[in-house]
Image (tube, rainbow, N blue to C red):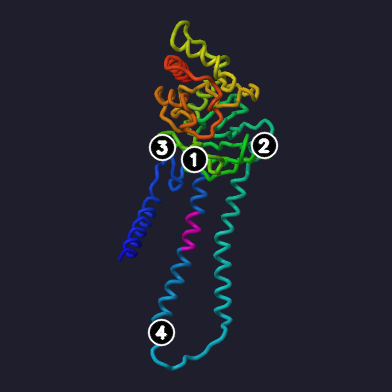
Amino acid sequence: MKRLANWRLISLFAILALVLSGCGEPFLSTLQPAGEVADMQFNLMKLSTYIMIGVILVVTIIFIIVFFRFRRKDDTIPEQVEGSHKLEILWTVIPILLLLILAVPTVTTTFKLADVSAADKKDSKALVINVRAHLYWWDFEYPNQKIVTSQELVVPTNQKVYFNLKAMDVKHAFWIPAVGGKMDVNTDNVNKFWLEFDGKKAKEAGNLFYGKCAELCGPSHGLMDFKVKAVSKDQFDAWVKSMQSVTAPQKAPDGSLVAQGQAIFNQSCIGCHAVTPSNKLPDTARLAPNLTNFGDRSRIAGILDHNEKDLKNWIRNPEKYKPGNMMAGKYPKMNEQELDALAAYLMSLKVQQ
């Protein structure tokens, strides 16, 4: 009875897992594609699933027919038949045809997804983004626009966006589940691919998609998230102009709490974090996320709610929230007044009014 109860429990969990696997938010689920790449990959998934289900159904039906029609009724030995050219040809040709049905669209789609020639042309007007993966955060450079941002990727909808992927420490993988499959981010070579964000689906998702690292890279691998703001072309152009207008760190009003926080930042944080978006900054200014538009973002460290309370908690003890991150121990301890001032300054870093 105890063993039966365990099997019932296992069966219940299996059914529950199957049901939950079909659930998903529009900004996160691969089963609700939100772009051309995701659509193509989803169609390949459906095609392979249909083929597998078809094979299973045919085999099951044949098994049932044989089981009932040719079951033993007496002790008479049935006629012994060896070999059948027709059957052998049939079960050889059918798998070949099924493989061709699956292989042709798969190979065609693979070559289409690998085509980044438009971004490699001289004087190309294609939108190119250089992605640099770190432990455990993301850096996004727009070389043609000459700007850099971190942790939140901003892209226009309804046009191809080309990505150049490079890891700065260990191997990672770049993945926006609702928009396209993952791509490895290596330390020794640059991987290239493209995505397209569907404008209608982006509106349904609140113009926000989730991105993740899909390659085990350390203790905080599961927390190496980033957000994607998919906006219209006009909104994207306005964001670019706003970022380009920031040519120097914003000067806080003298004597204000924000000014006190800026002074603390310049003493303790500026050595790793940049507060200007220029892509001409030296690599020493890219040891940690670029904070130019920190106040405009929707998450802190990619995982915490965007408010001063969580920001101060993060500064107090980043190791608590992302074990193994490179920020822990790189700055002096701060009292509550200093934390209040620094949080106020960071929240004031906005480029969109």
Q: What span is colored magenta in the figure?
A: 45-52
Above or below, comparing residue 301 to residue 76 in the picture: above
Dot 4: element: loop
Proximity of marks 1 and 3: CB atoms separated by less than 8 Å = no
| Foreground of the two, 91 or 276 | 276
Q: Quadrant of residue 269?
A: top right
How crowded is the residue under tag 2: few (<14 C-alpha within 10 Å), some, or many (20+)?
few
Identify residue type, mark 1: Gly
N-terminal of the pair, mark 3 or mark 4, is 4
For discs 1 and 4, the disc positioned in front in the rendered view: 1
Proximity of marks 3 and 4: CB atoms separated by less than 8 Å = no
From the image, tell me which residue sits under label 3. 205
From the image, tell me which residue sits under label 4. 71
For discs 3 and 4, the disc positioned in front in the rendered view: 4
From the image, tell me which residue sits under label 1. 222
Of the 4 image quadrants, the one containing the C terminus is top left
Q: Position of residue 52 (x, y in %)?
A: 48, 63
Identify residue type, mark 2: Asp
Queried whether the magenta region covers residue 48, the answer comes back as yes
Queried whether the magenta region covers residue 290, the answer comes back as no
Q: Which residue is at the far top?
A: 254
From the image, tell me which residue sits under label 2. 120
